[in-house]
Image (spheres, helix red, strand yellow):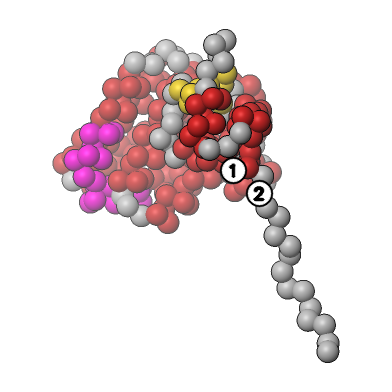
Amino acid sequence: MSEVAEKFARITPVPAYQMVAEAIEREILSGRLRPGDPIGTEAELVKQFGVNRSTVREGIRLLEHGGLVHRDSSRRLSVGLPHYDRLASRASRALVLHQVTFRELLEATMALSLASIELAVMRATEDDIAGLESNIAATEQVMHNPAAVAAYDSEFHIMLERAGRNRVLELAREPSNMLIYPTTQVAVGGSEQGARRLIEAHRMLVEAVRRRDREMARLWTQRHLIDWRKGFEKAGMDLDQPIDTVTGDSAAGG
């Protein structure tokens, strides 16, 4: 009998602690858990996941190393604001490794955002609009914190994409979204005016969605992204420098 050539690699079981870390990370990356939100104590997580304490501790250690989870003096756990290169997906890392520039990121974001906003104008529900308005109200409360403004801005645009109900566009935007956060932090970090203009643009985008006004939506999408570029340039950044050299430690969320 001739031997059959092996076509498959052996399956390696995923350690339980890694499954714990991935479950928590999914909630954070989906936006269901936001920076500052409590996660609970190790004991509470042991009960929820049905695993032993050492498994939870190892999973949390992975997330703490990446900056996704923060532990305060009382040992309670909350969502952190990691440096973007620790949070990024494989696709985001590939963009960084290829040394994509802010100019390239802006061009791609403009094209995808215009497609997303047109679908949101057609398909957004009242619940979608209410969620966007809540995001704007929350952003107004953190105007003096560029990292928090950038985090809420990321959430706002993810919500807009979901309102368009096109999963292909959502997935296409995901890698670049992770690079937009730190550059937005830079763009609004120079002055409070940057945060004010960002909030104004968000309000007008929501109004365009409410009115089902496609032209208004396209106009404010373009203005919003032009402001992003101007803020980036005012911060002394070069549009053609690689993204990974742009922010340094400023995106660490401190």
Q: Please give the residue where the numbered disc 2 appears in the rendered image.
A: 14
Residue 206: quadrant of the picture: top left
Viewer-nearest residue: 27 or 170: 27
Q: Is residue 120 magenta?
A: yes
Amino acid at pointer 1: Met
Q: Mark 1 and mark 2: span between their CA atoms?
A: 7 Å
Number of the label disc, if any, that sits on residue 205: none
Q: Are marks 1 and 2 in contact (CB under 8 Å)?
A: yes
Task: Work out which quarter of the rendered image holds the C terminus and state it.
Answer: top right
Viewer-nearest residue: 192 or 124: 124
- Residue pictured at 45% horizontal, 44% vertical: 109
Q: Please give the residue where the numbered disc 1 appears in the rendered image.
A: 19
Q: Specify few, some or many for label 2: CA neighbours under 10 Å numbering under 14, 14-19, or 20 or more.
A: few
Instruction: From the top left corner, tell me how far across and down residue 2 is, in percent.
Output: 83, 87
Instruction: From the top left corner, tell me how far across and down residue 158 is, in percent.
Output: 39, 40
Magenta segment boundaries in residue numbering: 114-132
Instruction: From the top left corner, tell me how far across and down residue 210 is, in percent.
Output: 18, 40
Magenta span: predominant SS is helix
As helix, strand or loop, the secondary structure at mark 1 comes to helix
Residue 69: quadrant of the picture: top right
Amino acid at pointer 2: Val
Viewer-nearest residue: 156 or 112: 156
